[in-house]
Amino acid sequence: MKFKDLTFKKQMHGGVGATAKFKEVTVSIQAGSFVYSTPRENGLDSTQYSSFEVAIFNNSEDGCFVTNKFLDTEDQVAGWTSKKDVEKLLQKLK
């Protein structure tokens, strides 16, 4: 899967988001004024963002955050993740 294969939809937070489900994890990629993206604005097309907030959840019943197992963060989400790094993540998980 590549970044261009993601389908971004308008989200309740006002921005856009996409998810990609893999065998063991689901990746959430979000952008908008209430998430850690560049720019932090709502109402834009996904192509207008240069970085995104990324969260990774395990697909077990507990759905725990496992973002820090795949990206360099100590938080539940990785903010300001570049398109290039999202692409690398998607390739790694496929």
Image (spheres, helix red, strand yellow):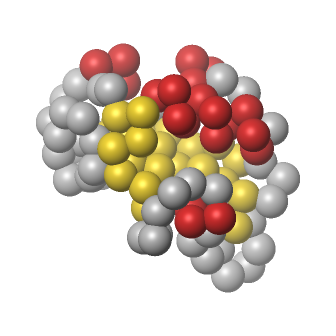
* Residue farthest to the bottom, as pictured: 62
Residue 31 in which image quadrant = top left
On the image, the x and y values in percent for residue 18 come to: 50, 39
- Residue 1 seen anywhere in this rendered image of the structure: yes
Depth order, front residue of 75/2 = 75
Residue 19 in which image quadrant = top right
As drawn, 42 above or below 66: above
User: What residue do we see at 56% from left, 65% from top?
Assistant: 68
On the image, the x and y values in percent for residue 13 come to: 26, 52
Q: Is residue 18 left or right of residue 66?
A: left
* Residue farthest to the right, as pictured: 23
User: What residue do we see at 57% from left, 62% from top?
Assistant: 67
Q: How many marks?
A: 0
Picture quarter with the C terminus: top right
As drawn, 66 above or below 7: below
Picture quarter with the N terminus: top right
User: What residue do we see at 67% from left, 82% from top?
Assistant: 62
Q: Is residue 78 left or right of residue 87?
A: left
On the image, the x and y values in percent for residue 42 come to: 18, 36
As drawn, 47 above or below 6: above
- Residue 30 seen anywhere in this rendered image of the structure: no
Depth order, front residue of 34/89 = 89
Depth order, front residue of 94/26 = 94
User: What residue do we see at 46% from left, 28% from top?
Assistant: 83
Residue 51 in which image quadrant = top left
